Amino acid sequence: MRTSRRSIRRPSAGELAAAVDRTVPDVAAPGLRVLFCGINPGLYSAAVGCHFARPGNRFWKAVHRAGFTDRLLSPFEAEEMLARGLGITNICPRTTARAEELEPDELRRGARGLARKVRRLRPAAVAFLGVGAYRLAFARPRATVGRQRERLEGAEVWVLPNPSGRTAYYPLPALVRYFRTLRRARPEPSRPVPFRRATPRPRGARPGHP
């Protein structure tokens, strides 16, 4: 298995501290097969200016082993994803040390901004990397990992496990299986459909009745 010879540059403590004021640019273009959507940049990624850059993050391994890429890419090679019809963005652009530092309102605002982005770029599928953030951002408290029934501005919606090395619930082989299921599904674009948020049903009301 051939990998990039370019290694991750490890940021200094000072660079990590200063990274809270930075953002990481999207890797995106119109008409992608899959737009992977993280929660928000971490300090390490913001410090080096690359998505999923912290050593131990399993995104790049999962993408490769699932068959999206023919070799293991470095975070510094993220632009090569575009030639494969793949892109990367985040729900929220703000950098934090941990995703848990984001407020629910911030996630919901990020979801609205993401919907506008998807409407403009028209990817076939959006793959959210983390079910907890997806539930909060899109008011889907019962969402589970996998393909969702809803679409986002015409794009298929998938929720995949968070690839962060801090998330030990999904070992790498399980993570790869979910990524591979998405690849094998071969999502196809559809016409834009408004993403409707789930609303509580009044007590005693039957399905299909107000």
Image (cartoon, rainbow, N blue to C red):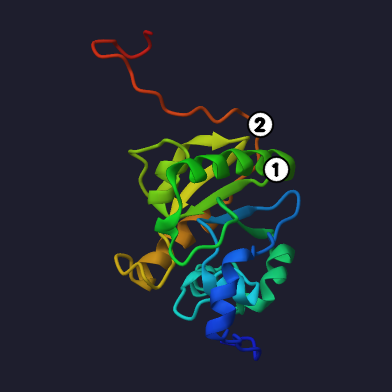
Mark 1, Cα crowd under 10 Å, few <14 / some 14-19 / many 20+, is many
Which numbered disc covers residue 122? 1
Where residue 84 sits, quadrant-wise, is bottom right
Visible in this render: residue 72?
no
Q: For this rendering, which residue is in front, 96 or 53?
A: 96
Q: Answer whether labels 1 and 2 touch (C-beta < 8 Å).
A: yes
> Residue 152: horizontal and vertical position, in percent?
57, 37
The residue wearing badge 2 is: 192
- Say above or below: 143 vs 72: above
Q: For this rendering, which residue is in front, 14 or 29?
A: 14
Where residue 48 sits, quadrant-wise, is bottom right
Task: Name the residue: 48% across, 81% down.
Answer: 55
Q: Secondary structure at mark 2?
A: loop
Visible in this render: residue 95?
yes
> Residue 112: horizontal and vertical position, in percent?
59, 38
Q: Give the side of residue 184 with respect to residue 22, left or right.
A: left
Amino acid type at image mark 2: Pro
Q: For this rendering, which residue is in front, 24 or 84?
A: 24
Task: Name the residue: 51% across, 45% down.
Answer: 106
Q: For this rendering, which residue is in front, 24 or 22?
A: 22
Amino acid type at image mark 1: Arg
> Residue 25: horizontal and vertical position, in percent?
69, 62
- Say above or below: 18 vs 159: below
- Say above or below: 163 vs 115: below
